[in-house]
Image (spheres, rainbow, N blue to C red):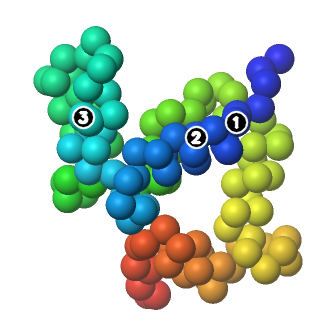
Amino acid sequence: MHKDIDFKAITESFRALDINNTGILSIAQIKDALKDQAIAQQEIDEMFKGLDFNNDGHINYSVFLAATVDKHKALTMSNLQFAFHHFDVSNSGFITEEGLVEVFHREGKKFTRP
């Protein structure tokens, strides 16, 4: 049995890297954080490129979370409930368009309605 993911520790790690408190990380911030590790710069660049889906030179918390979480540990009922409640901002038992707009806004993303 896998223990639950420590979202608090992951969030604290992200915040420690996000020195400007922008909600996004740049390659420079990640390189600075990993400078004392035995990781080649090319490997860091490749890792970042794989996470920078829109090629803007930044990754946000959601991408950071997805990259740092063990997928086997993530797919537990409590973690799925946690994720659902993240998007169910009104605690109605439903994920609404308004809730998605609010979550996207909190994460610094634009949500355009169709």
Sequence-wise, the earlier of marks 1 and 3 is: 1
Expressed as whole percent of the image width and height from the top left, the position of residue 44 reads 23, 28
Question: Image point 65% across, 25% down: which residue?
Answer: 72
Binning the other alpha carbons within 10 Å of mark 2 as few (below 14), some (14 to 19) or many (20 upward) gives some
User: Crowdedness of circle 3 by 10 Å Cα count: few (<14), some, many (20+)?
Assistant: some
Q: Kindly report the distance in space between the C-alpha atoms of the residues bearing marks 3 and 2.
A: 18 Å
Instruction: In the rendered structure, find residue 6 and report the number of the disc placed on it.
Output: 1
Q: Which residue is mark 3?
A: 31
Label 1: element kind: loop
Which quadrant holds residue 94?
A: bottom right
Q: Amino acid at mark 3?
A: Lys
Instruction: Look at label 1 and name its amino acid.
Output: Asp
Q: Residue furthest top?
A: 38
Which is nearer the N-term, disc 3 or disc 2? 2
Q: Name the residue: 40% across, 52% down.
A: 18
Residue, disc 2: 10
